[in-house]
Image (tube, rainbow, N blue to C red):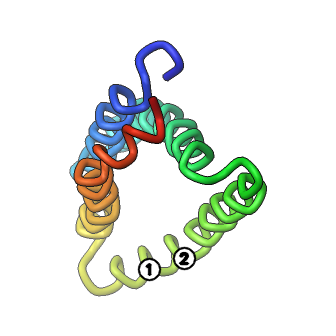
Amino acid sequence: MDKFGIGKVFFPSLLVFCAAFVMIASSRSLPLLISAAIPAALGFGTLNPAIMTLSMRCVPFERRGVASNTLYFGMDFGYFLGPTLGGTVNAYLGYSNMYFSALVPLVLCGIFFFFGWRTLRKKLY
């Protein structure tokens, strides 16, 4: 990310992470499910630092502690809320649709990032 910039890392990471969810949703065997862990780890492992860096660069220096804690709280809250919502979706729509529905927040994140890129670009470079 330091070499190429956040913009060139964010979207490919988001696409790889979304592809992992599609692989998980469409897998019908354990080997396919386990093989989906590779793009999931790659996507999350590159997307998470990009989001954290972007968050820290978008706030004034004196507010970075608050922004960092808010980011970690949001992640923890997502880890709490995600399985709860996923279980509810699973109960009504089934296993595959549970993972396809997880693509909605990821795609929305990409859309918000895409449309806000001009404003963010000024803060990043």
Q: Position of residue 95 (x, y in %)?
A: 31, 68
| Location of residue 11 (image quadrant) | top left
Q: Is residue 10 above or below residue 71?
A: above
Q: Position of residue 92 (x, y in %)?
A: 28, 86
- In the picture provided, is 17 more to the left or to the right than 71? left
Tell me the quadrant of the picture where the C terminus can be found.
top left
| Location of residue 97 (image quadrant) | bottom left
Could you tell me if residue 28 is visible in this image? no
Q: Position of residue 107 (x, y in %)?
A: 26, 56
Disc 1 residue type? Leu
- In the picture provided, is 59 more to the left or to the right than 16? right
Could you classify mark 2 by the number of other residues whose Cα lies within 10 Å: few (under 14), some (14-19), or many (20 or more)? Answer: few
Q: Residue at x 48, y 13 (%)?
A: 3
Q: Position of residue 4 (x, y in %)?
A: 41, 17
Could you tell me if residue 17 is visible in this image? yes
Element marked by disc 2 = helix
- Residue under label 2: 81
Residue contact at pointers 2 and 1, CB within 8 angstroms:
yes
- Residue under label 1: 85
